[in-house]
Image (tube, rainbow, N blue to C red):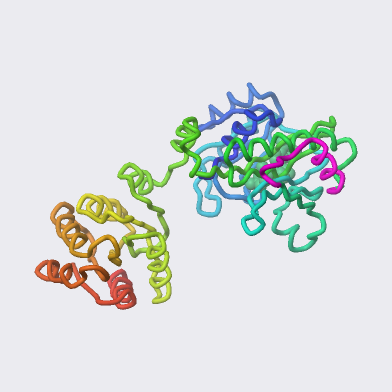
């Protein structure tokens, strides 16, 4: 689960990582209140889960209430690479002397944690990695050993951070590593990590991805998840316990298993269509699950055709067919449905479905044929 910047900063603060004081606002008036509390000058920052907000105009400095009004007015409602800004974070502005980069992730092939540190921060790290790879100091950390202050200090030296920033940066990195491990992050990234003109080192941005496998250890994550969902389709799906991701196309997809759902997206693309969603109904393709899946997809006005792609393994196709039949009776479907059912008990499943087929409910024998038909119907 990705966090918004403000949530990431709140998470950092728990581990003693210095961040600027600030507050969250949904409206222009609220933004002014937050600015008064944080102290001028402030920076008004779009809260969307996508990078490059600065370049897109989603981050503005303001020195008085009028400037906060115009900044927040411009940013709220703005579209940043497909993400609508519903909220801004307003924090006391920092005077930047230097911008660095710091992150921890998991290096899977090496089976070690990987720290990346650079004196060339502020720009995208992919860009630094491509144009100036030696500007990134990499540190592999064995999770059993952890990261101590001394190692952090040598790492900071090797990255060439400014002398006056080194001690503070080393201690901040030890805390960031603790946040990464104890906080169960897949990614903890600060870009930029800054040295202020007053000689203080702190996090100006926060990019945190939590490892959802660790949710059971973190009852406090629940409120973070609540703030995350904005797509009404995803919200509805989550309430129904479905694994759903909304996309931009017109073919609604239901498949069993994440792998099959991904392949279905690929095949729809291959035949010239665009998927409206990713929906993996998992192993239990019974009537309730199928009904819930069809309801969610049906509620999406951009869907023009639905492709149901089921390969029965442990799940039996005749059970799925009964699920589909019951769901069709429960839900008034707006768009035509193309079914591809194969695998265990496929014959029996198809036989059950046969009397229910029509111009609006079609069956195709293969994934490719079904995708072609669904894409045609979606046009
Ligand atoms: P991103 O563009 O989405 O990565 O957003 P960041 O939070 O990293 O901000 C982008 C840039 O805005 C930073 O690299 C800074 O140059 C600038 N910026 C952000 N906060 C401040 C601030 O408090 N003071 C100043 N002077 N610039 C800031
Ligand atoms: Mn940034």
Whether residue 340 is visible:
no
Whether residue 132 is situated above or below residue 268 in the rendered picture: above
**The magenta stretch spans residue 39:** no
Across and down, in percent, residue 101 comes to: 74, 46
Quadrant observed for ligand 1 in the rendered image: top right
Q: Quadrant of the C terminus?
A: bottom left
Main SS of residues in magenta: helix
Q: How many marks?
A: 0
Across and down, in percent, residue 268 comes to: 38, 71
Residue 276 or residue 327, whichever sits in front: 327
**Image quadrant assignment for residue 13:** top right
Residue lying farthest to the left in this orientation: 355
Residue 356 lies left or right of residue 157; in this view the side is left
Residue 362 lies left or right of residue 46; in this view the side is left
Across and down, in percent, residue 161 comes to: 85, 44
Residue 232 lies left or right of residue 292; in this view the side is right
Residue 23 lies left or right of residue 302; in this view the side is right
Residue 298 or residue 313, whichever sits in front: 313
Residue lying farthest to the right in this orientation: 163
| Residue at left offset 31%, top offset 56% | 283
Across and down, in percent, residue 248 comes to: 42, 60
Whether residue 289 is visible:
yes
Q: Please give the range of residues in magenta.
A: 142-159
**Image quadrant assignment for residue 11:** top right
| Residue at left offset 72%, top offset 59% | 127
**The magenta stretch spans residue 147:** yes
Whether residue 85 is situated above or below residue 367 in the rendered picture: above
């Amino acid at each position: 689960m990705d966090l918004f910047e403000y949530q990431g900063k709140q998470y950092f603060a728990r581990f003693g990582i210095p961040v600027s004081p600030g507050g969250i606002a949904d409206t222009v008036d609220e933004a002014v209140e937050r600015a008064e509390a944080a102290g001028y000058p402030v920076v008004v920052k779009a809260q969307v889960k996508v990078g490059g907000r600065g370049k897109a105009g989603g981050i503005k400095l303001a020195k008085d209430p009028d400037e906060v009004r115009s900044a927040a007015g411009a940013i709220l409602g703005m579209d940043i690479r497909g993400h609508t800004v519903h909220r801004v974070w307003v924090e006391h502005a920092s005077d930047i002397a230097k911008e660095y980069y710091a992150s921890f992730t998991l290096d899977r092939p090496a089976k070690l944690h990987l720290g990346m540190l650079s004196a060339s921060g502020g720009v995208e790290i992919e860009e630094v990695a491509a144009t100036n790879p030696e500007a990134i100091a990499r540190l592999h950390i064995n999770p059993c050993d952890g990261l101590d202050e001394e190692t952090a200090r040598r790492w900071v030296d090797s990255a060439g951070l400014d002398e006056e920033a080194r001690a503070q940066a080393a201690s901040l990195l030890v805390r960031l590593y603790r946040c990464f491990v104890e906080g169960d992050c897949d990614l903890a990234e600060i870009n930029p990590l800054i040295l202020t003109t007053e000689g203080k080192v702190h996090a100006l941005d926060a990019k945190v991805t939590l490892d959802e496998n660790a949710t059971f250890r973190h009852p406090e994550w629940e409120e973070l998840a609540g703030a995350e969902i904005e797509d009404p389709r995803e919200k509805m799906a989550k309430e129904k316990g479905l694994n759903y991701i909304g996309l931009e196309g017109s073919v609604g997809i239901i498949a069993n298993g994440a792998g099959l759902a991904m392949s279905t997206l690929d095949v729809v693309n291959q035949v010239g269509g665009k998927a409206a969603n990713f929906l993996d109904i998992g192993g239990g393709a019974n009537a309730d699950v199928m009904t819930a899946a069809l309801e969610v997809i049906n509620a999406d006005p951009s869907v023009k055709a639905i492709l149901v792609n089921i390969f029965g393994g442990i799940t039996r196709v005749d059970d799925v067919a009964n699920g589909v039949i019951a769901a069709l009776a429960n839900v008034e479907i707006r768009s035509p449905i193309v079914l591809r059912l194969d695998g265990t008990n496929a014959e029996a499943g198809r036989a059950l479905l046969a009397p229910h087929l029509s111009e609006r409910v079609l069956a195709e024998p293969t994934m490719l044929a079904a995708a072609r038909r669904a894409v045609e119907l979606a046009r």
